Amino acid sequence: MLGKTILSSPLRKLMVLSLLPGMFLLVTTAQAAAEPICKHALTLHGEAKYPADFTHLEYVNPNAPKGGSLRQAPPGGTFDSLNPFIIQGTAAAGLGNIYDSLTYHSADEPFTEYGLLARCIRLDPAGHWVEFELHPHARFHDGKPVTAEDVAFTFELLREKGRPFYRAYYADISNIQVLSPQRIRFELASNTNRELPLIIGQVPILPKHDWQDRDFTHPSLDIPVGSGPYRVAEVDSGRRIIYQRVENYWGADLPINQGRNNINRLIYDYYRDATVALEAFKAGRLDFRLENIARNWATGYSGSALSAGDILLESIPHQNSSGMQGFFFNTRRDVFSDPRVRLALTQMFDFEWSNQQLFHNAYTRTLSYFSNSELASSGLPQGRELAKLEPFRDQLPAAVFEQKYTLPVTDGSGNLRPQTREALRLLREAGWQMDGRRLVNAQGQQLRFEILMHDSSFERVVLPWRQNLERIGIRMDVRVVDVTQYLNRLRQFDYDMTISTLGQSLSPGNEQREFFHSEFAQSPDGRNLAGIQHPVVDALVEQLIAARDRETLITTTRALDRVLLWGHYVIPHWHLNEYRIARRNNVHIPEVRPPYGLPVDAWWVE
């Protein structure tokens, strides 16, 4: 929200199904023909781009050489666990490389899943179940076969003991049946959740024999067993993890894997300071960076390595939704329970000044939770979107229907007089008044809050905003903590405000529950950071998940977006519709650049 593919024929004259040891049932031609065709791919809308007999993806080089190593520095600064599926601990980067899932999500289609562990997928025409048939030669790294029992075990384990995300995302799976060693059926509670059969295929499959007698709920640095193209080769806790390409990888000859997984060793070196990581790259100790700081991109790579061509810089456009990055209010706290207070603080953030002075005018202001996509709301609600919102008119601010959503715009000079007047007006309405140089409520308490961060590079954005707030008597305390403490505080909702990003796909669905639904406002490790509890948001999230076609999905997403924006739960930041890539000149990228992802697994190293 993945195999030489073999299609099973529904026209066989005779099919034998195993019922119990020693018992078999003969199925007639008519009965077999009634069974849905087992397909090589599933797509949410329309048809899959690649046919059943495709040889490789268009955005790979099927003749790419194997070998070499790729060194990179992941964000976060440290890790203490090799279990990314639980809320405890800080998982190492790159662990997805060791696991295969039932399907693979292509990067040149909005939402299509191709068989990976699954040789084919069978979908009930009425939408009540989906089946996956596994490749009989699929193997874990220890040589044991990947079976339907492992798939069932994985889903039961993750939904019972994994992150709350798994319970939310896969809540509509009502039953799981192991039909044979290579065949599994998922029964669905509702046939309106159209993306569920696709996202079932995205879960990394864990070996039952390796996990059934171990404690899954605590962080561990024990080397996990997977079935993917890489295995963990070396671990230095908090500092480095190395993955080695599996020479006898079971899926190496599948069409979906041609031209992929080319690099022998994937090395993740951890740096607690982003500036030190940049200097390590320039000094030749790293091979690749995905740059997210505009100042670095504009001036940080200059030097002899760039001049000599040892370092290559490239901006790669994409068509992904950039989601929502911003200052997230914790509305569970009294200080931010009033939307007028939240809007007042929004008035005092000067994006135009930051863009000019800090970002070299590199960014566009974000005006949607689904920026850079057709899913974003705009203007006034009209047509089907208006009809979608009309039943909720009495539960929503009039502005949802009468005003275009905008954010304050300044001339970038730092002059905020109009915005300051508007902020003070809103604060007075909310019961706050100036008392000397302090903004206080009726009890004489100053409006004061703490912003929680784990990345000190954001201080240059936050501190000018703090100065603006001080002018109207508001005190902001800036707290920078390490990643482990940051995550623990988020899990306990122990913050007034934080900086975060909600990534969005072009086919939003079940994950929206965890982002915005009331059910997850008090759920530890949930992603409803703002604590949103609104019946209209809940209703629109459920309608979005149940959307039967693309047009309905777009309409419902725009309506949800509009309601969220007018709730003022976030002070939106900015976005960029391209990847900024810095790499050494021996790191090669295929000529075809897919519009919906950055598939580093298709790169190769000389």
Image (cartoon, rainbow, N blue to C red):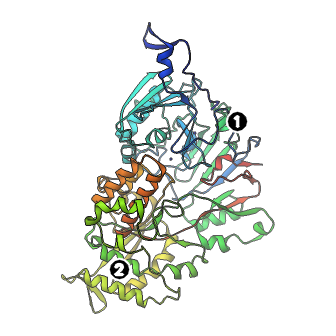
Q: Residue furthest front?
A: 383
Outermost residue, left side: 443
Q: Residue at x 52, y 81 (%)?
A: 352
What residue is shown at x 57% (from left), y 81% (from top)? 356
Q: In the image as oriented, which residue stretches furthest toward the top?
A: 22
- Furthest toward the right, the residue is 308
Secondary structure state at the residue bearing disc 2: helix
For the residues marked 1 and 2, what is the alpha-carbon distance in whole angstroms? 56 Å
Residue 447: x and y in percent read 29, 80
Q: Nearer the viewer, residue 183 or 94?
A: 183
Q: What is the quadrant of residue 297 in the picture?
A: bottom right
Relative to the observer, which residue lies in front, 581 or 277?
A: 581
User: Which residue is identified by label 2?
Assistant: 344
- Relative to 451, say whether 257 is above or below: above
Q: Quadrant of residue 499?
A: bottom left
Q: Earlier in the sequence, mark 1 or mark 2?
A: 1
Residue 581 locus on image (x, y percent)? 66, 61
| Most foreground residue, 37 or 187 | 37
Give the residue number, with chain letter if any, for mark 1. 55
Q: Is residue 440 above or below residue 459?
A: below
Q: Amino acid at mark 1?
A: Thr
Q: Does the CB distance between marks 1 and 2 fall below 8 Å?
A: no
User: What number of labels is visible?
Assistant: 2
Where is residue 74 drawn, in percent x and y?
Answer: 57, 56
Helix, strand or loop status at disc 1: loop
In this rendering, is residue 124 above or below 469? Answer: above
Q: Residues within 10 Å of mark 2 (few under 14, many from 20)?
A: many
Q: Tell me the amino acid under the disc marked 2.
A: Ala
The x and y percentages for residue 405 are 42, 73
The residue drawn where x is 50% and y is 25% is 147
The local crowd at label 1, few if under 14, some if 14 to 19, many if 20 or more residues have their Cα within 10 Å, is some
Q: Nearer the viewer, mark 1 or mark 2?
A: 1
